[in-house]
Amino acid sequence: MYDLQAKKMVHQFDDQDLDTFYSIALTPDDRYVILGQRKSLTILDLRNKQIYHKFEKVHKGSVYSVATTPDGRFIISGAEDGSIKFSNLKQRKKSIISKKYMPARFVS
């Protein structure tokens, strides 16, 4: 995490799996950062400076796009496999709805 006003790094997450990600989103309350990775989503808690949750094997390919609903309850992700999936952020449940829209890789 980088403080733009102080122009310095204030925290670095130590998980090596965070090195590669294809998409990123911030929740409306500015509390969580969502990383779209290879087949998975990683949620970082900015307040507690730790990994909040990992949704493993959400997709069959790289997650190229992530977004949240305006209330921050759900994550919408699109991947190279053409699927769009909805995961419940607050309840930490993955893929409550899954649709395949070839080639739908991007959500906003």
Image (tube, rainbow, N blue to C red):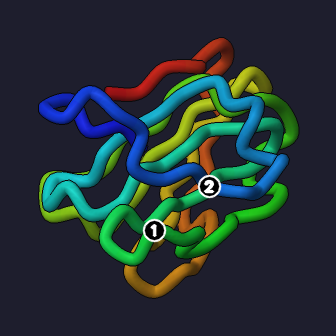
Q: Quick one: 29 or 77, which is closer to the camera? A: 29
Image position of 27 (left or right of 15): left
Farthest bottom residue in view? 91
Image position of 15 (left or right of 96): right
Kindly identify which numbered label has been placed on residue 11: none
Q: Quick one: 65 or 5, which is closer to the camera? A: 5
Pick the quarter of the image with the C terminus. top left
Crowd class of label 1 (few under 14; some 14 to 19; many from 20; radius 10 Å):
some
Q: Which residue is mark 2?
A: 13
Expressed as whole percent of the image width and height from the top left, the position of residue 14 reads: 72, 57
- The quadrant holding residue 53 is bottom right
Crowd class of label 2 (few under 14; some 14 to 19; many from 20; radius 10 Å):
few
Pick the quarter of the image with the N terminus. top left
Expressed as whole percent of the image width and height from the top left, the position of residue 12 reads: 57, 50
Q: Residue at x 16, y 53 (%)?
A: 28
User: Secondary structure beneath disc 1?
Assistant: loop
| Chain-order first, disc 2 or disc 1 | 2
Q: Residue at x 57, y 19 (%)?
A: 104
**Mark 2 belongs to which amino acid?**
Phe
Image position of 98 (left or right of 47): right
Q: Which residue is mark 1?
A: 49
Q: Is residue 101 above or below residue 74?
A: above
Q: CA distance from mark 2 to mark 1?
A: 7 Å
Q: Is residue 65 above or below residue 29?
A: above
Disc 2 and disc 1 in contact, CB within 8 angstroms: yes
Counting every numbered tag in the picture gives 2
**Mark 1 belongs to which amino acid?**
Lys
- The quadrant holding residue 15 is bottom right
Expressed as whole percent of the image width and height from the top left, the position of residue 97 reads: 55, 61
- The quadrant holding residue 88 is bottom left
